Image (cartoon, rainbow, N blue to C red):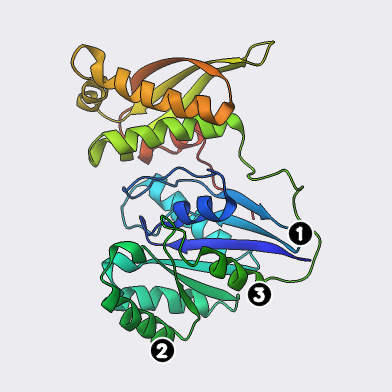
Amino acid sequence: MKAGTVAVIGKANAGKSTLINVLVGEKVAIVSPKPQTTRDRILGVLTRETHQIVFVDTPGLYRVNNALTDLMMKTTEATAKDVDAILFVVDGHTGISDDDVGRIKSYRDRGVPMLVAFTKTDIMPKENIAPNLAKIAQEADVDVIPVSARKGRNVRELEKAIVSLLPEGEPLYGDDVISDKSERFMIAELMREKILLKFDQEIPHGVAIVINTFEKSETGDLYRIDLDIVCEKKNHKAILIGKQGQALKEVSSFARKDMEKFLGAKVYLTVYVKVKEDWRDKQKLIREFGYEEEEF
């Protein structure tokens, strides 16, 4: 069979995580319309009789100056060096710029087999698709496949094209594995996803989730989860809590429903909001909150 690792790379909000979730058939990465949704290197594993694709979802290429973003970009660059193929994801809805072509060329020139996914074709004018595809193919000299993850268009064609880039080999993971991340990690990510979806641009980027308690009952039908939402400013804390705690109640309820769906059990959730000023520029706190540079 064919088996290998594929780094999924592209600008923030290009649709990388959504595409991986659709390809794998399970939610292995959180999604939102905001940049910096993905902060970690997350594996999503697709296994079929003839092949296994290990997708590595990377933080979006993003220009913001803080220590956390620097770490995220290092993670993306390191991942691209140690895979069997690269899937570069381009947001078709926003059109193809010369900067996009330049980035694609820079990864193409690394000598790793590469493919471009042109996403969000369901929300762009049809007449713009062909010229954009031609621009990528001609100027970057790489194969490109238009897809709509939301509508499921061309997703299996993309899968076939990815498989064609992979080497022959044994599966890297067992048939029942869909991600390398723990339940505890995913619970924290689900909480962060709901914050990203509910609050304005500034607040979610400065939020970390710390799981204090993650306990499963003996019967397996209940989890007790105690977590902290850590933000950078006192006024952010006030916004996250809201008037009479209403905002916090709403986002916690929103998150708890997804946690229960993910865990297949009832969840008793306790949430606190704490302030750690400018934590994204403090290496000690970045490590404490689980964001560490990985070895490849």
Residue 49 has which mark?
Answer: 1
Q: Where is residue 170 in the image (x, y as percent from the top left)?
A: 81, 61
The Cα–Cα distance between marks 1 and 3, rounded to whole angstroms, is: 15 Å
Residue drawn at x 21%, y 11% is 244
Q: Which of marks 2 and 1 is in front?
A: 1
Which element type, helix, strand or loop, lies under badge 3? Answer: helix
Q: Reading the chain from its start, which is encountered first: label 2 or label 1? A: 1
Instruction: Indicate which label's residue lies in the foreground, 1 or 3.
Output: 1
Q: What element carries label 2?
A: helix
Q: Tell me the residue at 46%/29% (across/down).
A: 258
| Residue at the (69%, 63%) spot, across then down | 4
**Amino acid tagged 3:** Ser
Find residue 102 and report its horizontal and vertical position in percent. Answer: 38, 78
Res 114 → quadrant: bottom right
- Residue at horizontal 21 percent and vertical 21 percent from the top: 238
Quadrant where the C terminus sits is bottom right
On screen, 180 above or below 111? above
The secondary element bearing badge 1 is classed as loop
Instruction: Identify residue for label 2.
Output: 138
In the rendered view of the protein, which quadrant contains the N terminus? Answer: bottom right
Q: Tag 3 or tag 1, which sits nearer the N-term?
A: 1
How dense is the environment of label 1, judged by Cα within 10 Å: few (below 14), some, or many (20 and up)?
few
Left or right of 36, for residue 84: right
Marked residue nearer the N-terminal end (3 or 2)? 2
